[in-house]
Image (tube, helix red, strand yellow):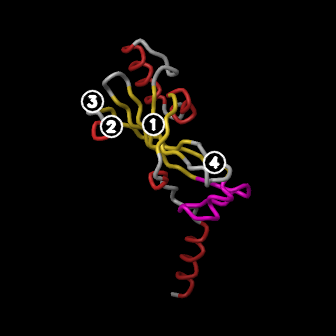
Amino acid sequence: MTRICLFMIVLLAATPALGFDPNKLGQGGSLLLSDIDPLIGQSAQLKQEIGAALAAIKKTADDVNCVGNRFPREWVHLGGMRAAPYTCDFSGKWLVIDATVRVTDRAGKAYDTITKAAMQNVVKVTETSPTWKWTTEDPFKDEK
């Protein structure tokens, strides 16, 4: 019984943070679809769907505006940076792209909550495992 408990403690301690929730940043910020190419490029299907949607509206990724969660200036090294989820306007059709977000300091330590230490030490945001959905319902209609 003691070995099992010790094993579980070691396993839990070695498990990386499940992810940082950028929705708790409390700020949005605009960016272009082309700014999130690294995330889009992680999924051939997403890239293909976006290519077809861009062709349908005769625009490029530099013509499509998106909104993401913005790190406020209190984040010493990330102030102004955006993170998923992103909502992009394809002329009356919207794409919402979410991802697993991980924030780390120079030593690679991951932070999963907003703390003073995270705001002072985090230098890198990594976005992986994109998921997405298309909608024709304006996600910003209540803000207008």
Q: Which mark is residue 105?
A: none
| First of labels 3, 1 by sequence position | 1
Write the residue at 46% across / 56% down: 24
In this view, 104 is above or below 48 = below
Q: Secondary structure at mark 3?
A: loop
Query: Alpha-carbon distance for marks 4 and 1?
Result: 17 Å
Q: Are marks 3 and 2 in contact (CB under 8 Å)?
A: no
Q: Are marks 2 and 4 in contact (CB under 8 Å)?
A: no
Q: Are marks 3 and 1 in contact (CB under 8 Å)?
A: no
To which residue does mark 1 refer? 67
Query: Alpha-carbon distance for marks 3 and 1?
Result: 16 Å
Q: Nearer the viewer, mark 3 or mark 1?
A: 1
**Type of amino acid under label 1:** Val
Q: Which mark is residue 78?
A: 4
Q: Magenta residues?
A: 103-122
Q: Nearer the viewer, mark 4 or mark 3?
A: 4
Write the residue at 36% across / 14% down: 56
To which residue does mark 3 refer? 136
Write the residue at 57% across / 71% down: 11
- Where is residue 111? Give x, y as percent: 59, 61
The question of residue 120 being in magenta is answered with: yes
| First of labels 4, 3 by sequence position | 4
